[in-house]
Amino acid sequence: MADLDDIRDGKDFGLGQAAENDGFYLKGSNNLDWGMKDRLSRIFRPETGRTVMLAFDHGFIMGPTSGLERIDLNIVPIAQYADCLMGARGVIRSSIPPTLKKPVCLRADAGSSILTELNHNVIIDIEDAVRINASAVAVMVGIGDEATEAKTVANLYRAADTGNKYGVPVMGVTAVGKQMARDSKYFGLASRICAENGAHIVKTYFCDGFEKVTASCPVPIVIAGGKKLPEMEALELCYKAIDQGAAGVDMGRNVFQSDAPAAMIQAVSGVVHDGLKPEQAFELYNTLKSQK
């Protein structure tokens, strides 16, 4: 019970000073619940509104691919430089120390591998994402694939339903099949469909006319790094994407398959958060690499 003899009247009410009522800093997120915004603010730095995600979920379809043979040796030492970690639940639980205190974007669909037809997937129980304390879940969407489009859109729709229920944001990941054109028309269509069906973040690929993709998508877009590029080219990719409206990058192979992964992810962060030009970032990469 409160001590009734020591109740002090309030004095500082800030009279004449209006209460702050600013909108949330992320595109399309102002009307989300507090928990959603809290999780998004772990992924996207509030001071820049951007993120550098480190993707190492490749093993759930590729197995121990180059650079991911040992998560404890390849990923854990560089995780400190990422804003967010993207992996599958088995690897998160077995190999990522919770003491890293990094937000997790959890790969939330599975069911096929590179040995079969991809995207015949189901989504995991959202409660398992909560148990892992995921800040977001990622679901692949195969727009334009006759065999999997309806199923993967339904997966995203259901993930958004349960994500909204539990306050966990959903990232729609646009798949690219052999028959899909890698242009702004396709990526704009796929990204918009993800957002329209409830995705709070969209992960897609950079392309010519990318500014049209980001302009027409009402939620933040992060770009996929894709196949391994020479370091300078990867940094140019990051710069162009941010310059044309991306809210971040989700880099995997262009980081963990680099000759100097720790230097590379710091150079990428310099582009995304510090506004470094590709040449400046490449100089930073070489400087850090030489200090190994």
Image (cartoon, helix red, strand yellow):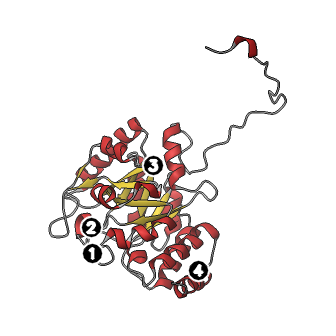
Cα–Cα span, label 3 and label 2: 25 Å
Outermost right residue: 16
Left or right, residue 31 beside residue 180: right
Q: Earlier in the sequence, mark 3 or mark 1?
A: 1
For the residue labelled by badge 3, is the local secondary structure a helix, a strand or a loop? loop
Cα–Cα span, label 3 and label 1: 29 Å
- Determine whether label 1 and label 2 are within 8 Å by CB: yes
Q: Earlier in the sequence, mark 3 or mark 2?
A: 2
- Determine whether label 3 and label 2 are within 8 Å by CB: no
- Mark 2, residue position: 59
Q: Amino acid at mark 2?
A: Gly
Where residue 281 is drawn, which disc sits there? 4
- Determine whether label 3 and label 4 are within 8 Å by CB: no
- Determine whether label 4 and label 2 are within 8 Å by CB: no
For the residue labelled by badge 4, is the local secondary structure a helix, a strand or a loop? helix
Left or right, residue 283 beside residue 81: right
Residue 53 position in % (x across, y down):
46, 63
How many tags in the picture?
Answer: 4
Q: Amino acid at mark 4?
A: Ala
Cα–Cα span, label 1 and label 2: 7 Å
Q: Earlier in the sequence, mark 1 or mark 4?
A: 1
Cα–Cα span, label 4 and label 2: 29 Å
- Mark 3, residue position: 200
